[in-house]
Amino acid sequence: MDFYILKEEIVKSLNLTLGVVEKRQTLPILSNVLIEVDESSLKLTATDLESEISTTSTISNFNSGGKTTAPARKLSDLCRLLPDMAEIHFFLDGDNLKIESGSGKYNLSTLPSDDFPVFEFEDSQGQINISSENLKTIIMKTSFAMGNQDWRHYLNGLFISIDDKNITSVATDAHRLALASSTLNEASMETTDGIVPRKSINEIGKLVGDNSENVLIKISQSSILVEAAGTKFVSKLIEGKFPDYEQVIPTGESSLLVIDRKNFSDSLSRVSVLSSEKYKGVRIITKKNSLNISANNPEKEQGEEVVACEYSGEEIDIAFNVNYLQEILSTIDSETIEINFFGSEKSCLITDPNSENLKYPLKAYQLQPSEDAVRNISLKDNFTIESTNIILIFQSRV
């Protein structure tokens, strides 16, 4: 192996691989990147056994091909710190990878390329093409609602569903749900879906972040493949069945609130300063032309604001976790938002009036007459009442 490459080319490729490189070093070779060179290109591959990324870049001069593995982070740091537009010379000398640029000479240890794990993708008959912008949008609009180390492992990822015309992404942590959909560039040959792990979704987001090209997606029974601009990312899917999210989205007769998104968010930020540190609850009371927002805490401190709005329907007295509410507001681009209320103890539905492809159901905190009772959340056949000192779980009967 003996080749030359510009700093910018290899640094860009290394940056894409670092997110996958194993940090815990359960196996030494997982801290390495696989380096493969032919007459025209350099291919870098990284894996953590759950996912794999490979990216190709153009070399400036070729003497001989070959492959090896080298420590990914050391290689990345070294190349990144070289002068801009520097040409870097790489060549193998026994078990060492030699790196030269300008007056600098560096030496990295290697491990055999034959020991590098190969990720097997079970090929799928169906594949889709979607613009990188649309894929980035549906990920950004929903991924915030994914579970994080939830014992229900199927919540710790993004559910992606593909039918003949659309791709839909859904995430939920059982407190809120986020749904976004986008039209495909061309019809899909088959319907498929899968739950993509949180870490893999983050890497896919980076992959399509600054890319303007179309993205190829394949989903098999156990893995997903995403390919764009010379980079291929493959990940295992989370085993399990994703909840029937359509049953969670509230429907039926409702009261409608239309409000300026920024004004609403700013008021929530100020009032929530005095909410309970543990539950971050804010109370909302709807009026015909105004919205009353209030919060208090165990120290008897209280904040209250009135915000102008348009409202039609019965008066609602309801409470939410302000952090969940604010995360939803931050993903909506429109100047106004719409909130459909279905009762003071039921989930509401937050939507973007300029997009039918975004839906955000949010679970309500049930208000309690007792100051100690902080939260009462419906959980299917059970409901819980939580206070600072006690948690009670009751079975509801119809």
Image: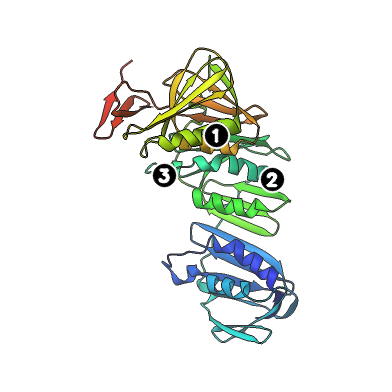
Quarter of the figure with the C terminus: top left
Q: Residue at x 46, y 33 (%)?
A: 271
Residue named by callout 3: 153
* Secondary element at tag 2: helix
- Left or right of 393, for residue 14: right
Q: Residue at x 69, y 69 (%)?
A: 8
Dot 2 or dot 1, earlier in sequence: 2
Residue named by callout 1: 265
Residue named by callout 2: 133
What percent of the width, then of the height, locates residue 50? 49, 56
Q: How many marks?
A: 3
Residue 126 in sight = no
Type of amino acid under label 1: Ser
* Secondary element at tag 3: helix
For disc 1, the neighbor class at 10 Å (few under 14, some 14 to 19, many from 20) is: some
Distance between mark 1 and mark 3 Cα atoms = 32 Å
